[in-house]
Amino acid sequence: MAGYRVAIDAHAGTACTALLRRDFTLAWRRRGELFLPLLYAVIVTALFPFALGPDPVLLGRIAGGVLLVIVVLAMLPALESMFRADLEDGSLEQWLLAPQPLALLALTRVIAHWLTTVLPLIVVMPLLGALLNLPMNVLPVLMLALLLATSLLVLLGAVLSALTAGARRSGILLALMLLPLAVPVVIFAAGAVAAAQSGMPYLAPLVWLAAALVLAIVLAPLACAAALRIAVEA
Amino acid sequence: MSRSYLPHWVHWLGSPPNFYRFAGAWRPWLMAAALLAAVAGLYGGLVLAPPDYQQGDAYRIIFIHVPSAWMSLFIYVSMAVAGLVALVWRIKLAEIVAMECAPVGAAFTLVTLLTGSLWGKPMWGTWWTWDARLTSELVLLFLYFGVIGLYNAFEDRRRGARAASLLALVGIVNLPIVHYSVQWWNTLHQGTTVDFLDPARSSIAPAMLWPLLVMALATHLYFFASILGRTRTGLLSLESGKQWVRQLVSEAAP
């Protein structure tokens, strides 16, 4: 019995590695698309000084919140197609038939998605921060808050993306559904950035975000699996 | 053979034709009771209740605002419970009830926001402020819109109903998180004045309390009547190919 368990666990590891490798290969073959969210973020960041005037003090004061919102918006278009292609070509049915738990496969997909589409956005934060005159001491807090907040949002977004995978149109719909879920995440991430900017302790909101992330890592894949079952069983 | 632990009438009511007839019989009575309660509550609130020592007559919007706010949450919970039943036991009727809750709940949420805005102008001097309760209510409205939008985005209505039911369940986990996070973020709204668990702590005068409770009763009755009516229509359109609907139509137009 124990040996049986170990065999299953080993297969789960193999399956997740295979899935990760497949997702990375697909992302690499379409590497041009990976730059689109980055380009979007850079363009929107560049629009703010035009709209508000080039005053460095004003830009520095709002930079943290603005960059946070830009990252959330730049994540949205990619979220929509997280499971769509797999539903259309039938891979998702294989996921359901696979002996590995569906929630585990969904979590693997979330990790691959985060690494390929969201991590680049966080990597370019120093550049975007410089464009908006973000204070240097706030930058690490912003990046840490973004690491936690985007992971949380991708986990929540995966549930919504699975729900809309079989729907007719879902671009704006996904944004509408994600907004209520994103409110607490944005509040705490922005709270940490604002606290760091005014020289106050910023650890508490970050710890709250981390706690929520731990909870979401456990619960979101289960909800995502339930949503995928609804999407496939039509 | 597995024994059912549910009473017989639950199974009986779960069948669409039976529910259709049951809802048709109860709806007029519930609607009439809702109207009566609303007339009594509004008379008590707008005429009999004394003006507030601080807010004068402007506070009287409370008799619309607070029952609507209670309903906006009550309907969301009802929708999520019906959605859970729909997802777990795959009962068609529960799917329709859950989905028909959403527009009614969204309407009550909108009424809450609009009356709150009208009340806020003379009291706080502004139509809108990013206060905790206002923001939670706005987020609730978006949750309702998300459920309605997701339901309508599917060709297959039953699949749409199941997806939207799951979204409603995700939303109900999210709702307290939103509530406490925006409270931590910003608060201006007055605290709770009606405390059901400890009536001694309620800071509202009895002459103002009874019309408020009667109005709450009226909105609940209205909600039940409206759900019965909406579910009837929903059943008819979902089951339009079935024998009992054909029979019903041929009876109505021989």
Image (spheres, coloured by chain):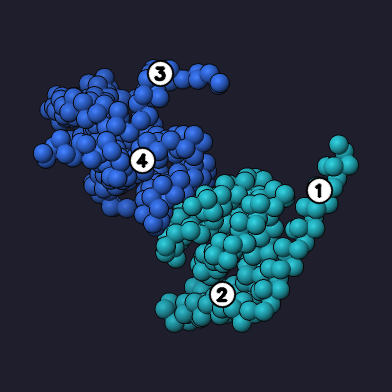
Q: Which chain is cyan?
A: A
Q: Residues within 10 Å of mark 2 (few under 14, many from 20)?
A: many
Q: Which residue is label 4 attached to?
A: B96
Tag 1 residue? A9
Q: Position of residue B221 (x, y in %)?
A: 25, 28
Q: Are marks 3 and 2 in contact (CB under 8 Å)?
A: no
Looking at the rendering, in which quadrant would you find the N terminus of chain A?
top right
Q: What is the spatial separation of the Cα atoms under label 4 and label 1, in whole angstroms?
A: 41 Å
Corner quadrant of residue B25: top left
Tell me the mark number nearer the camera, choosing from 4 and 2.
4
Q: Are marks 1 and 2 in contact (CB under 8 Å)?
A: no
Q: Are marks 4 and 2 on the same chain?
A: no
Q: Which residue is at 49% across, 39% downward?
A: B87
Q: Inspect this view and state whether residue A148 appears.
A: no
Q: Chain of mark 2?
A: A
User: Looking at the image, how many numbered discs can be counted on the residues?
Assistant: 4
Q: CA distance from mark 1 to mark 2?
A: 36 Å
Which residue lies under the disc numbered 3?
A: B8
In the rendered image, the vertical position of residue A37 relative to residue B248, given as above or below: below
Residue at disc 3, secondary structure: helix
* Tint applied to chain B in the drawing: blue
Circle number at residue A37: 2
Q: Residues within 10 Å of mark 3 (few under 14, many from 20)?
A: few
